[in-house]
Image (tube, helix red, strand yellow):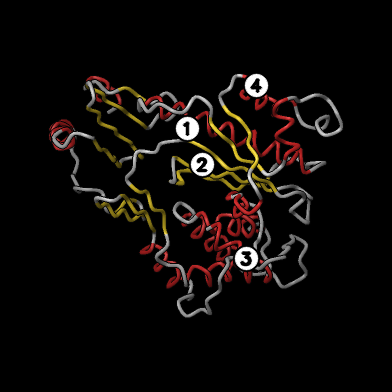
């Protein structure tokens, strides 16, 4: 199929090898391949049906029409934008695990919750626990609000205890009351790319390692996010925030290149919003003083990107730091505001 698509005039994405693009003047056709499933769309009404006819002549395949459901993802398209959700899948897993009649809660994790691998509560059935976590991980494709909570309970799949299962059930309690939540992508022309980055410091009680988070926007649309426990220990909040910003920068560079493949022009200088002024200062001048001497050299490529004026770190107040929701438990008011 790759060979055939190239014969038809498609160009493969330079960063995403599952992406194919065909551009003819101002008309373009975008194609994404996922194993044996294909999604395609165009800005010209006749290009999509014509492409479908060509593909059906060459390959044995079925056409499912306008995209409404894909691998558990519900897609609602209208004149104002696109809404993505996994409501149907969520109802299925709530029924599967007998979680349909739970008491509703307002946040997916209790404020101040500190789970440990050395918890002394009774052990639970590992296959069931792992299946539960796996189901919730798939939900994070449209539910960034549970990303941090699921990531934390997912750390204990090797030896789960009652305390870990209780934390997982609280996530289900939260999901029960927010079944219809999802991602809304309004139809507007603002394609300004920017990101928020944040990190807790010594968030894990077992190994004192931090959790980094990043949220990536095009205009008002959240298009990508991550919440990840880092592999090294930070010796200061400035170091934790700087390393998180470096991880955020790599994702931004990938997104910039993908947008260029789609012939979408990005702003020449992309903003990464950070709450730590020391990390912002390091990005401008990473001299070897007490705040930077422990940071591995590989993370200083962020300074190079700042120097090349591809990205810039900007200060954002704690109240507006969207990435906070991806790194730590929060009180209800703050959580709902950031959500």
- Tell me where residue 54 appears, x and y as whole percent: 14, 31
Residue at image position (33%, 36%) is 32
- Tell me where residue 148 appears, x and y as whole percent: 60, 55
Real-space CA distance between mark 1 and mark 4, rounded to the nearest whole angstrom:
18 Å
- Answer above or below: position of 57 versus 155: above
- Tell me where residue 301 appears, x and y as whole percent: 66, 24
Q: Which mark is residue 255?
A: 1
Q: Are marks 2 and 1 in contact (CB under 8 Å)?
A: yes
Q: Secondary structure at mark 1?
A: helix
Q: Are marks 1 and 3 in contact (CB under 8 Å)?
A: no
Q: Secondary structure at mark 2?
A: strand
Q: Which residue is mark 4?
A: 304
First in residue order: circle 2 vs circle 4: 2
**The N terminus is located in which quarter?**
top left
Residue at image position (45%, 35%) is 192
Q: Which residue is mark 2?
A: 216
Real-space CA distance between mark 2 and mark 1, rounded to the nearest whole angstrom:
9 Å
């Amino acid at each position: 199929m790759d060979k055939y698509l190239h014969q038809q005039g498609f160009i493969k994405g330079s960063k995403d090898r599952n992406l194919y693009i065909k551009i003819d003047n101002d008309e373009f056709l975008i194609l994404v391949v996922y194993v044996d499933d294909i999604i395609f769309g165009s800005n010209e009404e006749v290009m999509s049906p014509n492409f479908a006819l060509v593909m059906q002549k060459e390959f044995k395949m079925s056409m499912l029409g306008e995209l409404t459901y894909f691998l558990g993802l519900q897609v609602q398209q209208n004149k104002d934008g696109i809404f993505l959700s996994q409501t149907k899948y969520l109802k299925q897993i709530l029924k599967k695990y007998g979680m349909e009649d739970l008491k509703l809660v307002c946040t997916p994790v209790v404020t101040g919750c500190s789970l440990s691998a050395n918890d002394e509560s009774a052990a639970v059935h590992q296959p069931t626990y792992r299946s539960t976590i796996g189901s919730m991980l798939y939900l994070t494709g449209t539910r960034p609000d549970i990303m941090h909570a699921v990531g934390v309970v997912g750390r204990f799949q090797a030896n789960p205890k009652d305390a870990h299962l209780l934390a997982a059930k609280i996530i289900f309690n939260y999901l029960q009351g927010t079944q219809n939540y999802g991602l809304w992508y309004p139809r507007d022309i603002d394609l300004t790319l920017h990101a928020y980055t944040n990190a807790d410091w010594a968030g894990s009680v077992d190994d004192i390692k931090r959790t980094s988070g990043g949220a990536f926007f095009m205009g008002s649309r959240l298009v990508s996010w991550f919440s990840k426990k880092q592999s090294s220990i930070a010796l200061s909040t400035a170091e934790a925030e700087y390393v998180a910003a470096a991880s955020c920068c790599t994702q931004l560079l990938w997104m910039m290149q993908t947008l260029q493949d789609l012939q979408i022009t990005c702003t020449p200088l992309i903003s990464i919003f950070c709450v730590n002024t020391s990390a912002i200062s390091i990005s401008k001048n990473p001299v070897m003083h007490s705040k930077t001497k422990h940071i591995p050299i590989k993370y200083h490529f962020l300074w190079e990107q700042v120097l090349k004026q591809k990205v810039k770190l900007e200060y954002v107040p704690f109240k507006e730091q969207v990435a906070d929701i991806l790194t730590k438990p929060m009180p209800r008011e703050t959580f709902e505001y950031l959500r």
